[in-house]
Amino acid sequence: MLNTEFAKYYPWFTQSRYHESCLEENQNGTRVTLLAYYDGILAGCCHLLYISKYPHFVSREIPEINDLNVFPQYRNKRIASALFDRLEGIAAENSSYVGLGVGLYKDYGNAQRMYGQRGYVLDGEGLMYGNNAVRPGETVRVDDELLLYLIKQLI
């Protein structure tokens, strides 16, 4: 179902085992996935990873809010904020902090603004590509793997 919905809204989306893997991680307790509905129609989803793939979060046991998606026609209806409210609450049950990674090109502009408004700050580790630090003078590709990570104190 999720693959079909994503393919409807994102022409670049390809069928994969991603959503099946998410379900498996939900079943084994390493991920929480929330689906958002608007007037009974799937409007988006977001995840909380109890074990991030980002080494800085792993070493500090910081859970990561991950892969926020609100379908275009449902944006500006506070759906992303509602997902974050719930995921931050879940993270606060076991952690004083929550983190996330954000892309750097224009498609992430709305998310970048929202994260700042919600109190997320840079984690101080600098620019990452594929969860590895980008060194001065290094050339990297600007794509979804080029991220800055942010954290928020919950308690």
Image: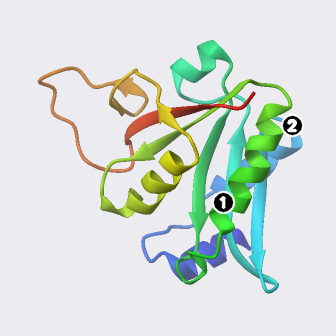
**Would residue 27 appear left or right of 51 to someone viewing this image?**
right
Quick check: marks 1 and 2 in contact, CB under 8 Å? no
Q: Return the residue nearer the eye: 98 or 140.
A: 98
| Lower sequence index among marks 1 and 2 | 2
Q: In the image, residue 110 lies at what x, y percent?
A: 44, 62
Q: SS at mark 1?
A: helix
| Label 1: few (<14), some (14–19) or many (≥20) C-alpha neighbours in 10 Å | some
Viewer-proximal residue among 142 and 150: 150
Q: In the visual, does 88 lie left or right of 123?
A: right
- Residue 37 or 24: which is nearer the viewer? 37
What distance separates the C-alpha of mark 1 from that of mark 2?
26 Å
Q: Nearer the viewer, residue 44 or 153?
A: 153
Q: Quadrant of the N terminus?
A: bottom right
Q: Quadrant of residue 128?
A: top left
Q: Is residue 73 above or below residue 106?
A: below
Type of amino acid under label 1: Ser
Res. 25 visible in picture: no
In this picture, is 137 found above or below 13?
above
Identify the mark at residue 28; answer none if there is no mark: 2
Q: Position of residue 134 (x, y in %)?
A: 27, 25
Task: State the image coordinates of residue 149 (x, y, percent, origin top left).
Answer: 46, 34
Which color mode does the image show? rainbow
Q: Is residue 37 above or below residue 134?
A: below
Quadrant where the C terminus lies?
top right
Tell me the crowding category of disc 2: few under 14, some 14 to 19, or many 20 or more residues within 10 angstroms, Cα based.
few
Residue, disc 1 = 81
Q: Residue furthest top?
A: 59
How many numbered marks have been drawn onto this rendered protein structure? 2
Write the residue at 53% across / 38% down.
120
User: For the residue marked with disc 2, what is the amino acid?
Assistant: Asn
Q: Residue furthest left?
A: 137
Which residue does the image show at 86% across and 37% down from the upper left? 28
